[in-house]
Amino acid sequence: MSAMCHAALLAHKTVARSALALGFTLVVAVAPIAAAQTGGTVLGTVSDRGTGQPIDAARAQVVGTTLVAASDTRGAFVLRGVRPGTYTVRVSRIGFRPEVASVTLAGNDTTRVTLVLTPSAVELDQVVVTGTGGAVEKRKIGSSMGVVDMSAVQEQMAVTDIGQALASKVTGLRSVSVGGGAGAARDLRIRGTASFSLSQRPVIYIDGVRVDTRATEWTNATGIGSKLACCSFAGGTSTDRLSDLNPDDIERVEVLKGAAAATLYGSEATNGVIQIFTKRGKNESAPSWSMSATTGMDRLRPNLPTKFFPNFVGTDGTRARDANTLIGSGPYQNYDVSVQGGGVRNTYFASGGYMDEEGSIQPNYQKKGNFRLNLNFLPTDKWSIEGRSMLTRNDIAEEQAGNNWTALLGNAMNGNPRSATAQRPFGEAWVPVSDIKKMQTYSDATRWTGGMTLNFTPIPSFTHRFTFGLDDTNEQKSRFFPWDGNYGPAGVTNGQRDLGYRFYYSYTADYLGQYSFHLPKNIGSDFSFGMQALKESERFNIAVGNTFAGPGVSAVSSAAVTTGGEAYSEKATIGYLAQDRLSFGQKLFATLGVRVDGNSAFGDNYGFKTYPKADVAWVLSEYGFMPQWVSSMKVRAAVGQAGKAPGAFDKFQTFTARSVLTGTPGVVPDNPGNADLRPETTTEREAGFESGFFHDRLGIEASIYHAITKDAIVPKPLAPSAGFQSAQSVNIGALENHGWEASVNYLAISRGKFDWTTNVRLDGNHNRVTDLGGVTLAGTTIQVGYPVQAIWTLPMTGYSATTPGVNGRAPNFTRGSTNVYMGPPLPTFNASFGNTVRFGALQFYALLTMERGAVFQNSDRPYRVRQGGSDEYLQFLNSDGSTTFQADSVFNYWSLFDAVDSRDNVRLREVSLSYTIPDRLLSRTNLGRTQLTLSGQNVIWWDHCHCVDPNMNWAGGDSFGISNGFLAQPSPRQYRLSIRTRF
Amino acid sequence: MTRLTRSLRIVLGVAIGAVAVPTVACKDFLKVQDPGRFSNDALDNLTVLTAVANGVEGQFQQVYDDFVVFTALNSDEVINSSTWIEWADVSTGRIRGDWATATPGWSTAMDEILRNRYAAQNAADRLTRVLGADASKSPLMAQVKVYEAWADLVLGMGYCEAPLIQNGDRKPYTQLYAQAITKFTTALTIAQAASQPQWVSFALAGRARANLLAGNYDAALADAQAVPAGFIKQALYSVNSQTTFTGGQLHYNRNRSGGLHPLYWSMVDTSNSNNGAVNPVQYVKDPWTGTADQRMAVSHKAGGVAIGVDNKTKHYAIQKYSDYTNPITLTSKREMNLIEAEVQMRKGNLATAIADLNLNRTTAPAPLPAFDATGLTAADVQARLLSERFAELFVEGHRMTDLDRFNLVTSVLGTGRARRFPLSRNEILNNPTLHQGQAACPAIS
């Protein structure tokens, strides 16, 4: 790469950090010498009509100018530099109807304006920026976008992490805790599955900077042999880098749901884009402090299927223990403090947070510290500089879970109580729970995420935005097996230490220009153009020390056998974009856009990829023919393409260097490579409407979409006789997702002290493989005509009550030899029903969710029975442990068949009760709005699954596999008591 | 309109600049390199060829453990005590056509052996390309050629059919033996030209076995006799090299997923307590004398019931594989003695056959009383031959083939069992010459 490119793209971490730090310093240092503005001043206040409380972060703009300000926590805003004349000041905020006020200024007058906003169920005037080629009101875009106002979420619930906050807040977005204890990863995806092999996690940006989203174990990524007990450190759901973020720093989240909306993000946007916007200070406001303190606990639901265990006595007379007795209450505490404010030409937001969460099953905890500093500086009327910096330390003691010989609950639940001994009171078949508890598994991450944005407005109609950013994660994992534990099945005798380092960085360099002008016949045109360069790399270094001489040492170097591994991947994208949005008055908007991408993962014979888009939004309510009770109505349609780049090095034909024999270098064929490899391309068509009724008290929004993914990358195995180990990545597949989304927001009652708001969100998705290019893949995971990762099983074909079965006793079952389709792995229908009721200072909130249509391989169920455990089997044994016909029936059945269970469930996902302390009680304390909240997450659920939790999956986060719940650890119930205040 | 045109020109200029400058400056921006792997061209280098040849050898040895475990499970050597349905199926002789292709098993063992054969051919082509005429007398060429032949031999031993070439049609195992013999002869020629006695012996031993299994008894005898005394070739495993042995699954130190077959539990000599060890090393008794045969060491928990990881099956650990790093014998002069004995038996030279058996039987690690050839019939000699093969080659990958070729599967293990493994499902699905549903054997239950 050329030196110029190095400089421009900050292609070295030290350079990048230094450059960003320098810029940051400049923002701080230069701020005080800002020049004074001339012109008049508008001082405004914004408050909520319903509660009378000031509204924070409302956007105030002098219409027809570039003068914009945001209200502070007291609801105050200042607009300076207003030239003499009469203007309209417009104030908007998510969740409220925009209001306007007329102001007249002469000379350097100062005038005051007060605006009272009415809650609104419709968001047409909300300004969004993600994937839109510049800031724009939602009314002007033709694709669907979800927006989550984090401060509103926090008014209702104590939010533990951003993934949790997004759950059931945006139609089409699935954010589900699939297992593990504190710090474990979540399945986060939008509109189903759009690939045969690639991660389905949306790409995530924070303030314009692409960030690390890894949420899977390191097993296959470390470059170390899989036959060692390394490096699936915790065995299953792993840690989630999304949990590094402090929810308290977040202002709002914008969600682009698919290719039609995310075209301008190019080759990584098939699965949608999530952009997180952090808080910033407000101009001309005194320091405003916010503090919160939360306490609570995590506790698993005691529904583990081992309640019959204590009925049995093991071989040495030990009475077996019920795994439910392992469940404890893991304490939780969280403290956040932030301050924000600003002068005439600068703002600041600084925050610090500390969280300490312990899991319900010990040992397991997450301790996290966050620091953030966001600065904004306007050196001249034409330039603004924003600097953002986040430092996180996130220490997690991971729970041993998942498909793992040392899974703690896995051993406790999958044992045989009749084999219980003093050492193995749960009848553990593999590793005693007491030995697992002696293991030490840590994941410690230090992360810096930051960036700078320069905005340049030479003339009001021509704006430029430059964004540079870096996300730098240094992660260390460690797992220690003590010398004296019984870890044989895990391949460990006399102890082992696994030590791993992961270094991830992602650079973002982004330019966006926007020129607004008028075409003939007063057609408005907003032309955007720009480029984006992204580079990310990931390196793993692993060291394993196996077999210690005795207790007392734990360093890798103190072991008898030491092994190392290293893996590296790197991917670069460069993309160019252009878009023009035409406005026909305030009624009709049409957008044409294109993104052209080059990517280092594309095959050498393949060039750049072009992704076009077009959308139209038509605001019917601007016409006079609508009845009066229809307060707003927009219909929209969009079509667009986005892509998914192949794996970083899949295009190369390679031969693997491996250590063979007793440590001799060897080389064998590995990856056949593909010089023609190109991105998976998804073309999405969607249409829908957004409407408001009865003065926007009732908002209804709906969309339908149909996404076709072509050139889907199929890992096509070569015949083993043709040599290469890895499957060849080839673009021969196709699949489709079609679905619908609908939401209803209703401000049902708002009378004096009493408010009732209700919302319903519904969505459906159907996924189907349409083409595999004539290739028949082994297994049933990907079959033409069925969903990706569909669940299949061999059916029962016969039963005999008298013929001996697998255990030598009747009955006997027989199974067919052809797999039968059972269902999709993801729900085809999701619903949520939320209600917020406020009476004076009290507020009650509850969110009920439903999932339907999905099934999964509940592999725990037959496994437990085959082990001689499980209440399903034990309940039929006689009190002396002798068998019965029913017990034999259960045993013989599950010795032959897979268990396929439904993921259908109805869940009380969130519930809370808040009390806002009246101002009169705070009058002597100098405190502002102060709220006490008691909340519960994942409180109770109803299902007909023979499992601990139907959402379980053995691997979590961005793992592609979502069809098996084997040995997964269920998620706990979370109870929180928090107090939030301002001063 | 003029103003609009001027504005558009400005915008266009800025846009072109925004695109052109970084494009020119970053022309190498999209170039990445995988530092963990070799490209094809990088291997055409004299200094890397040794690693290429060692890769072939190491890959074969790595897969051989899976072959040993699954042939043992499908014979009377090992019983499943795991919770893996696939292991349970094989242990009971059920070979499912829809075997999970990603699971280490008989099917993936075949996949790896086929890949190893390709790796050997790919390496041979590379050696020829880089070394030119010297390739025909290169020790490295001898190394890769002998393993190419061994791949065919092992495929013939374990599987009903396999392609003889890349993406080739299905051929019966008899043709694999024939092809192995041809390849061993080629390897032998190169090894002799390269003056590499270890590869000469390894090729001779392989060809002796291939000839025996192909029914070329005189040729087998000649090759076996040509193998020097004391010769042994083992597959090596090492934690350092990450090529560890699945056989560790058969030991109490590890997973207890399989152990000695119940047919022999009553024959375990429990007299040795190892001075009260929790897991004493004991031996399966010699059926002819009742003496502990140290070639078949097992371990069963003293004073209690050791059970497998399935929590129900009695577990007798296979002691020779107490750790992931234990080697497996691929072939040896002692196997050659057994081949000589079998050929002599088949030729009717019963006394010579017994004498050949006694070569092993009376020496360490056995050592047991010699057989007396007096009055023995051909059937008697065969029984002794089979018991000696069982003991000498215990859990080394031979027993399943022996049960098949001596037609003993039904009498030893019962009816309805697969005698060999079918063609790998991965090969059927991905080899363009092959089609599903054409398997000749075994009957897939």
Image (cartoon, coloured by chain):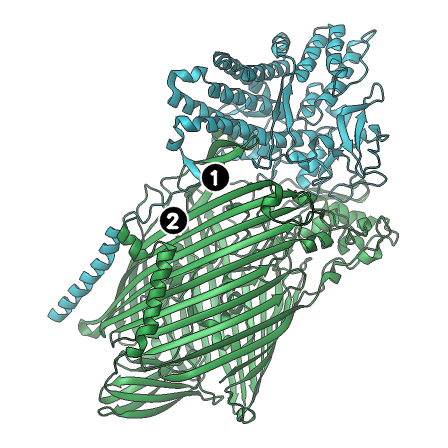
Chain colours: A green, B cyan
Question: Which subunit holds the residue at mark 2?
Answer: A
Q: Secondary structure at mark 1?
A: loop
Q: Is residue A641 visible?
A: no
Residue type highlighted by circle 1: Ala
Q: What residue is shown at x 39% (from left), y 50% (from top)?
A: A571
Disc 1 residue crowd, few under 14, some 14–19, many 20+, Cα 10 Å: some
Which residue position holds label 1? A727
Q: What residue is shown at x 76% (from left), y 16% (from top)?
A: B361
Which residue position holds label 2? A679
Residue type highlighted by circle 2: Pro
Disc 2 residue crowd, few under 14, some 14–19, many 20+, Cα 10 Å: many
User: Which is more N-terminal, label 2 or label 1?
Assistant: 2
Q: Is residue A51 visible?
A: yes
Front-most of residues B233 and A741: B233
x and y, in percent, of residue A707 in the image: 42, 56
User: Furthest-left residue in view?
Assistant: B2
Front-most of residues A178 and B197: B197
x and y, in percent, of residue A622 in the image: 32, 79
